[in-house]
Image (cartoon, rainbow, N blue to C red):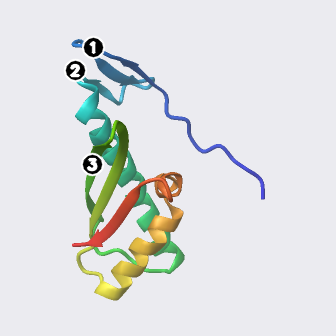
Amino acid sequence: MTEKLLFTGKTHNKGGRDGFTRSSDGELDLRLAQPHPAAERLFGAAWSACFIGAIEVAAAQRKIKLPVDPEIDTEIDLNADGGSYFLRARLNVSLPGIERDIAEELIHAAHEICPYSKATRGNIDVSTNLI
């Protein structure tokens, strides 16, 4: 198998009261006065965007036409335990118009496909839920 670079996301961040993040293409330009909860929100947004793409790939592989676009409400928790910090995540997926067993199959497949899911596997507690 030959590796192929598909995309490189580039951002510049500055901390502090006048903190911000900007992408090199200008599409992302946000004030970030506090690093948290901004980091968790951005991580949730990025992961859920990727996960939607993974659901679409899983559906296409199975020749399933999605009647509507998938929606995801993602929750990223920042936790502390004895001075150690860790994350916990919930991806609450809505796939209207898809039978429950098929929707659950697509969510499971997407969790195997999505690079964010792969990167976090075994590192944080993640639950995927069909809502």
Question: Disc 2 marks which amino acid?
Answer: Ala
Mark seen at residue 127? none
Q: Residue furthest right?
A: 1
Q: Alpha-carbon neighbours of circle 1 within 10 Å: few (<14), some, or many (≥20)?
A: few
Question: Disc 3 marks which amino acid?
Answer: Asp
- Whether 122 is drawn above or below 38: the answer is below
**Mark in the foreground, 3 or 2:** 3
* Secondary structure at numbered mark 3: strand
Name the residue that disc number 3 marks: 77
- Whether 54 is drawn above or below 19: the answer is below
Which of the 4 image quarters holds residue 15?
top left
Question: Disc 1 marks which amino acid?
Answer: Gly
Which of the 4 image quarters holds residue 80?
top left
Name the residue that disc number 2 marks: 33
* Secondary structure at numbered mark 2: loop
In depth, the one of 127 and 59 nearer the eye is 127
Residue at the (45%, 67%) spot, across then down: 110
Task: Pick whichever of labels 1 and 2 is earlier in the sequence.
Answer: 1
Q: Is residue 23 left or right of residue 98?
A: right
Name the residue that disc number 1 marks: 16
Q: Position of residue 116 (x, y in %)?
A: 47, 52
Q: Position of residue 7 (x, y in %)?
A: 56, 40
In depth, the one of 127 and 27 nearer the eye is 127
Task: Pick whichever of labels 3 and 2 is earlier in the sequence.
Answer: 2
Give how far apart the Cα atoms at labels 1 and 2 are.
6 Å
- Whether 110 is drawn above or below 28: the answer is below
Q: Is residue 19 visible?
A: yes
Q: Alpha-carbon neighbours of circle 2 within 10 Å: few (<14), some, or many (≥20)?
A: some
* Secondary structure at numbered mark 1: loop
Q: Is residue 99 visible?
A: no
Task: Pick whichever of labels 1 and 3 is earlier in the sequence.
Answer: 1
